[in-house]
Amino acid sequence: MTLEQFVRQFADAIQTDPGSLRPDVRLADLAEFDSMGRLCVMSMIDSRFGYVIPADVLNKMTTIGELFHCAQRGSTEV
């Protein structure tokens, strides 16, 4: 999966327009990235990457791009 595809999948998971998102967008700035949005993103990462991202790791992520690279690695390194 490319970063561009991830951004589209992320947008779909939090039910927002993918055109409004970029890899450098801060997760904390997205109103849609609330508790339900986080669960949807966790589910998307699990289904697309086969990686169950722990909530504490997700909470350490600051941007969409950083989250993508973490999901790609399947790693808990931040």
Image: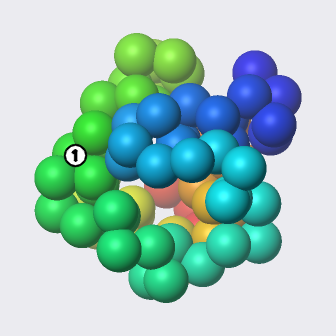
Q: Residue at x 30, y 30 (%)?
A: 43
Above or below, comparing residue 69 to residue 49 in the picture: below
Q: Report which quarter residue 52 is drawn in.
A: top left
Q: Is 22 positioned to the left or the right of 75 in the image?
A: right
Residue 8 visible in the shown view: yes
Residue at left offset 80%, top offset 39%: 3
Count all numbered tags in the image, as a single digit. Answer: 1
Q: Position of residue 23 (x, y in %)?
A: 76, 60
Which residue is outermost to the bottom? 29
Residue 62 spot, x, y in % from top left: 57, 77
For residue 41, say whether it is visible: no
Q: Place residue 22 in its image quadrant.
A: bottom right
25 lies left or right of 55: right
- Residue 54 placement, left or right of 1: left
Which quadrant holds the C terminus?
bottom right
* Secondary structure beneath label 1: helix
Q: Residue 48's x, y, as percent?
A: 51, 18
Residue closest to the far left: 36
Q: Is residue 34 above or below residue 14?
A: below
Name the amino acid type tagged 1.
Leu
Towards the viewer: 16 or 70: 16
Q: Assign the N terminus to one quadrant of the image.
A: top right
Please say which color scheme the image uses.
rainbow
The part of the image, by quadrant, that contains residue 58 is bottom left
Judge by depth and name the residue closer to the eye, 47 or 50: 47
Where residue 77 appears, as percent x and y from the top left, is 58, 61
Q: Identify the residue at image location x=45%, y=73%.
A: 30
Residue hosting label 1: 39
- Above or below residue 9? Residue 70 is below
Give the crowd class for mark 1: few <14, some 14-19, many >=20 residues within 10 Å. some
Relative vertical location of residue 18 with respect to residue 51 in this rendering, above or below:
below
